[in-house]
Amino acid sequence: MSDPHNTSAIPAGTEVRAYDGSLLGSVREVHPHYLLVGQEGEHNDLEVPVHSILGFEGGVLRVSVNRSSVTEVDDVETAHRMGQE
C-alpha cells in the first residue's frame, strides 16, 4: 500500500496490530476516518482512526495506537442506532 491512509485498499478481515505489537483484532468495516476493528467473540469493537495507520505489509495493518488509546464501540448499540436489529 503506497498511501497508508488509502482505506479503499484495506479489505475486511485484515489483521490489525497495535503500536506495541499486540493484536487489536481484524477489520470489520472501513469508513473514511476510522476503521471498525473487532475480535472474534468480543462484544465491543474498536474505532481506530485512519490517521493512525503506519503501514500495511504481509497482510497485517500496523497502527500507531494501542488498545488503551482507542474508543470502544458497543456493536449491539451501533446496530440498534442504524436500525439493523
Image (cartoon, rainbow, N blue to C red):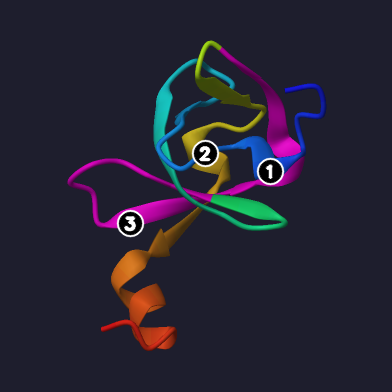
**Counting residues from the N terminus, which is met first, the one under dot 3 or under dot 1?**
1
Residue found at x 45% / y 43%: 12
Query: Residues under labels 1 and 2: Cα distance?
Result: 9 Å
Residue found at x 29% / y 72%: 76
The amino acid type of the residue labelled 2 equals: Pro
Pinpoint residue 9: horizontal percent, then vertical percent: 65, 36
Quadrant where the C terminus sits is bottom left
Q: Which mark is residue 11?
A: 2
Residue found at x 50% / y 18%: 59
Please give left or right for residue 69 compared with residue 79 in the image: right
Magenta-colored span: 36-57
Q: Nearer the viewer, mark 3 or mark 2?
A: 2
Quadrant where the N terminus sits is top right
Query: Are the two marked residues, 3 and 1, in contact with CB atoms closer than 8 angstroms?
Result: no
The outermost residue toward the left is 41
Pinpoint residue 26: horizontal percent, then vertical percent: 40, 37
Would you name the residue on which mark 1 appears?
A: 7
